[in-house]
Image (cartoon, grey):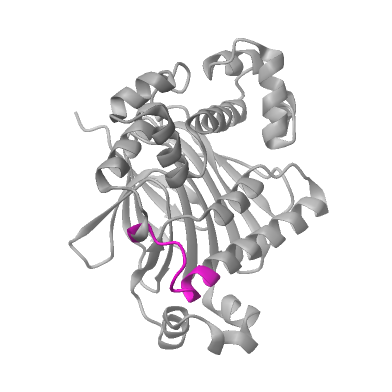
Amino acid sequence: MDRTISLDFSYDDFITQHGKKVFSHTEPEPNECSWQCPRELGCGSFHRIKIRPGFDLWLTDCSFCRDIIFKNYNLPVTIQFNFTLSGHYRIRLHGNRNTKRFFGEFQGISYYNTPGPFCRVLHDVPARSVSLALQPEVFTTCFEKHMKLMPPLIHNMLTRNMDTGYLYQSAITPAIREVIHQITGCPYHGITRKLFLESKALELLSLQLHQICDGSSFDPSRMRMHPQDKRQIQGIRALLDGSLETPPCLKDLAKTAGMSHPKLNRCFKEMYGMTVFQYIRTERLNKARRMLQQRYSVTETAFQVGYDSVSHFSQVYKKQFGTSPSASVKLTD
């Protein structure tokens, strides 16, 4: 039985199915919109923050229970700076029969001046990403005096109005990962939040542009890790994503990967910027935040993500996100 769901995507109505809105909508802060995933599709949210007119910051954190196909895009032309933390995607450009597969953690730049791509989001891995979407004229205005200093691919794209889809793809560096975590864990509200997120969005943009300009910067093709080790680590991450509540011990994970546990931690940190234990804790807390946004109780959430003590869960949650679990529930009301 095909459990795939097809949805339409537009800037004004966001996500619809047969013309009907399927995601509940809230405005938790001025210039911010949040769309909650309905339980029949999974859990999590899409969050749009208007940094400036024509400059949006998007936060995606969803776990789908079936494959989702996004099509019939009705969006303004934008250049998108994408930072994907996890997910499994199959993308086909408009007018192209070839489908590209994207999996795991990566960063990229995309630009379309024709209808958006066909995108299938597979349900086997949580879809988590941070994206900066800038309309070309806004990008040009922001850097008007420095456009000639832009990397050739950016300069050519804007001056020639090319439609080339994905222009650039690379691994996420530790510096970029740190800024992403600061954005997703922003504890502020009001004008402080707006200024903080705007500064971090610009910092993220500058880090990616710097990486493009620096030809000797971090490149996944130059990773010292053996391809077989890389595949094993990707498998370990997929295993952890499916067993966050009761994950295997490090010894069993190392046995599954066919390497010692020090090597497992070393390789895992090289690929994902954190040890196995840090990854489990981070993903548990990310799942907890999604559940709280779905109005699960703090107690139920704590137990569902693997914490035996609600007080301990509350402590680590506040340390991670700067707010208590109960406050997170109230923010959705």
Chain part drawn in magenta:
209-221
Q: Is residue 294 left or right of residue 271?
A: right
Q: Report whether residue 172 is seen.
A: yes
Query: Which residue corresponds to the image point at 63% horizontal and 82% vertical from the top-left?
Result: 141
Task: Return the residue found at the far top.
Answer: 308
**x 61%, y 46%: residue:** 181
- Residue 313: which quarter of the image? top right
Q: Quadrant of residue 307?
A: top right
Q: Position of residue 103 (x, y in %)?
A: 33, 47
Look at the picture and state if 333 lies above or below 46: above
- What residue is at 65 percent from the left and 68 percent from the top? 53
Residue 212 belongs to magenta span: yes
Residue 326 falls left or right of residue 168? right
Q: Is residue 55 above or below residue 332?
A: below
Q: Is residue 76 visible?
A: no
Q: Nearer the viewer, residue 29 or 246?
A: 246
Q: Decide which of 253, 20 is in the foreground and name it.
A: 253
Q: What quarter of the picture does the C terminus occupy?
A: top right
Q: 247 or 232: which is nearer to us? A: 232
Does 316 appear above or below 231? above
Left or right: where does residue 70 sit relative to residue 150? Answer: left
Q: Measured from the top left, where is residue 189 in percent x and y? A: 78, 45
Q: Position of residue 223 (x, y in %)?
A: 37, 55
> Quick one: 250 or 137, which is closer to the camera?
250
Is residue 286 part of the magenta span, yes or no? no
**Residue at the extreme right of the image, as rendered:** 191
Q: Which residue is depicted at the point 69% across and 17% down?
A: 312
The quadrant of the rendering that contains the N terminus is: top left
Total marks in image: 0
What percent of the width, then of the height, locates residue 180? 59, 50
